[in-house]
Amino acid sequence: MTNATSRTFSLFSFGSNAQCQLSHSSAEDVDVPTRVEVRLPLPSRQDGVAISSNGNHTLLLILGQVYATGDNTYGQCFVPASTPRISTFHKIDTSFISAGLRPTFVAGGWDFSVVIASSSTHDEIYVVGHGPRGELGIGADTTTATTPQLMPDFPPRGCRVVQVCAGMGHTLVLFDDGNVYGWGHSRKGQLGPTNASRPACWTPTRLVFPDGFDPQKVVCGREFSAGIDRTGRIIVLHTAKDRHGLLDVPSRETITGWTDFQCGWTSLHVLLSSGRMVSWGNNSHCQHAPRTAPPISQISCGSEHTLALGYDGKIYAWGWGEHGNCGPRSVPDEVNVRHATPVFAVSDPKPNEIVYLGAGCATSWIGILHRE
């Protein structure tokens, strides 16, 4: 007899899988949500799961345990680089982390990975992989680290990490005092105008925002960064030619009552408490929220596509879907999904719950909590 309170967790993935970054060992693209056949811990809540899928590898953080899969050419999956590809999620050996700390944040860049480990008193930041332009943040003498390295003398004393994110070539960390530090590519102003004259920042540098701006969340695009404060004020850090319209930020009145702020490689998106999305920047691959989108409660934005959970319990996708990351294509040669297309629905009558949405570099992820 089944216990009425028993629960299980399932993770589904679809999209680009050439390096097994979906944790499907077939190494072929997948255009329908397909269950990851790896036994995972049971999250107790939505924020117990985090996925960062960039380049051709994926990091999964679930209840303080880190899993990795995909391209491991530079050890970015926390396995010796003599194994160039990991075919399914494996639980990484965290013996490199100081005693008394456990992983709390992960971020994956193009060929590098970041893990933040925490105790009740402090945080430590570890990096691994390839960073020819400062992506590792541990100095110009180290462009490749095939084993995890502790970032020296960072974070600043007394500061606690609130958020970390990584783009293709740069990383941002938001601290509880409102300060943001970053490292990696900086030539396009993604680490602030004061660093734009440098092609790279090889160690963490504080980003300078206008006076009075207190970011609540930060995001990393391909060659820009951005932050949003409680009032909906948005600052975009990008000093290069603005050919995608990233600096065409909507007024605060337009995004009053924001609940989430995300970006793609060349676009920005705000989710409002009303269930509406506001998008700007590049729309060449239909990245902007379509008019056909229903009221939305949750989003995850990948490189050039978005997954969204509607109030109706269905998951929708739009944007660049060449690898099946927006579901099956109705027209074989059409790579852009122009409308909010349903790709997944919670099955009835079981009271299942979608607890996680993730979107990466042409990859899509759905976490389902099954209540028996």
Image: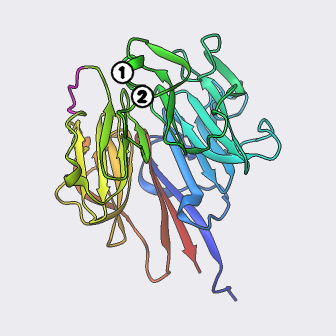
Query: Is 280 left or right of 61, judged from the image as shown?
Result: left
Q: Look at mark 1 in the image and give the residue it sits on.
A: 193
Magenta span has 243?
A: yes
Q: Residue furthest left?
A: 291
Labels 2 and 1: the sequence-earlier one = 1
Q: Indicate whether 75 appears above or below 60.
A: above
Distance between the Cα atoms at labels 2 and 1? 8 Å
- Tell me the colour scheme of the image: rainbow
Q: Look at mark 2 in the image and give the residue it sits on.
A: 208
Name the residue rendered at 23%, 36% in the picture. Answer: 282
x, y (%) of residue 62? 63, 55
Determine which quarter of the picture holds residue 195. top left
What segment is highlighted magenta in the picture?
241-245
Please state which amino acid type lies under the numbered disc 2.
Val
Is residue 56 or residue 127 the one in the foreground? 127
In the picture, which quadrant includes the N terminus? bottom right
| Residue 204 visible in image | yes
Which secondary structure, mark 2? loop
Query: Is 140 left or right of 101, judged from the image as shown?
Result: left
Is residue 156 or residue 224 the one in the foreground? 156
> Any mark on residue 346, and which?
none
Q: Main secondary structure of the magenta part?
A: loop
Q: Residue furthest front?
A: 211
Q: Pointers 2 and 1 in contact (CB under 8 A)?
A: yes
